[in-house]
Image: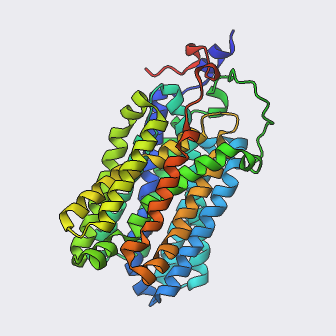
Amino acid sequence: MTTASVTRTTQAPTTRAWITAVFVVFTLSGLGIATWLGRIPSVRDELDASTFEMGLLVVGMSVGSIAGLTFAGHIVAKLGAKHGVQIAAVCLVVGMVMAGVAVTTGWGFAAIWVCLIAFGFGNGLADVSMNVSGATAERLGGRTIMPMFHAAFSLGTLAGAGLGALAERLEVPVALHFVVLGVLIGIAMLVAVRWFGDERVTEPEPTDTTPVPLPVSRWAVWKQPSTLLIGVIVLGMALAEGSANDWLPLAMIDGHGLDNASGSAVLTVFLAAMTVGRVAGSPLIDRFGRVPVLRISAAVAVVGLGMLIFIPDVPLAIVGVVLWGLGASLGFPMGMSAAADDPRTAAAKVSAVATIGYVAFLAGPPIIGFAGEQFGLLNGLLIVFVFIVAAGLASGAARERTPDAEPADANRRLDAR
């Protein structure tokens, strides 16, 4: 019996079931993050916290996220992405539920901070695990799906934000909200992950025989130029996405004279453009390849952001926001796919690239805020402009592996039917 047939008979999930399960986990991950973000006003009121104190809580979650990303490469390489998501689900449930209870019962900042570290750790570990598993399912499925996975994440954040706004309006206690959503998200993740395949078993032996020490050290991949260049792509596009989430409403209010409600509505336009770009981008990537699509995406994002910054006319600025969202939509998922191209280094490389990308979410807001305070918020967004250009210039690093490095035996793919 061949290795291929053993793989086929011992691996229960079909590719279709695996892909569906990854979609579910991406959506739940977005829902979990947005559940916390959507209740920040109530958390601040419950704690009677200052802006600085709320910033310290965000740092706690960020510390946990970086820790999760740092150890994810080792965990996924050792145990597999499936078990990585299982561990992440437990951390997410414990962190979210206990944070909610701590807020409502007045346990204090230190207790909430510890809970958010656990929550952040689960988010970081889930990020790497679901991207590694999704990239493997994408290869086995034979078509580009990663942008669709990230579109599902975006839909999850929109759902979480909507539920958070509803909970705020109905004055639902934070503890009740977090307990219910946390338990449901955790159970749904643990159920969905049962249909994950094991990328360490199902991935065919690559014909590329370039020596790679196994298991791959999570530190060794940092020495590879391709890791750093893909990291530049992810960093630039993550900054393009994150800066809009943090600053776009204020940029429209302070820079273009909109009121608060209209400024927030423009952010919704940006998020919708991101989601549309991710849904529509997959067939474009299949037809033209990652590198051309990345270069065009960066150019579109630069044009859109430039319109927002330099054109005072509000309707044209909003058109720029749409172009910015469309252009920024595909960079992060394509970077994850590129990092996971070689199954021998996928876990470690995705962990490294995701860590570089998270620098944008951690360092971007304060840097842009400082520049905006000195030169105006619209001018502060020129920092994002520069990083998007850098991502476009580095796009060659995301090129697909050559055909001779791909598995030759099509029968090794899991049956998608």
Query: Would residue 150 be found to the left or right of residue 98 on screen?
Result: left
Which quadrant of the figure contains the N terminus? top right
Query: Would residue 230 be found to the left or right of residue 268 on screen?
Result: right
Q: Residue 176, located in which quarter of the rendered image?
A: bottom left
User: As displayed, is residue 241 above or below residue 22?
Assistant: below
Seen as rendered, the residue at the extreme front is: 310
Does residue 307 appear in the picture of this structure? yes
Is 400 on the left-hand or right-hand side of 256? right
Count of labels in the image: 0
Query: Foreground residue, 2 or 222?
Result: 222
Residue at figure coordinates x 54%, y 39% from the top left: 337
Q: Dividing the picture into quarters, in which one does residue 282 lie?
A: top left
Question: Residue 199's spot in the image, x, y percent?
Answer: 62, 33
Q: Residue at x 38, y 70 (%)?
A: 38
- The residue lying toward the viewer, choosing from 170 and 315, is 315
Q: Is residue 182 visible?
A: no
What color scheme is it? Answer: rainbow
Residue located at (62% from left, 66% from top): 64
In the rendered view, tell whether residue 183 sits above or below residue 9: below
Percent position of residue 197, x then y = 57, 33
Give the position of the C terminus as an image quadrant: top left
The image shows residue 416 at horizontal and vertical percentages of 46, 22
Task: Report x, y in % for residue 11.
Answer: 59, 25
Residue occupying image coordinates x 29% and y 76%? 255
Compared to residue 387, the image places residue 7 above or below, namely above
Compare residues 206 and 81 and report the one nearer the observer: 206
Q: Is residue 238 left or right of residue 350?
A: left
Question: Which residue is farthest top?
Answer: 1
Vertical placement of residue 132 versus 255, above or below: above
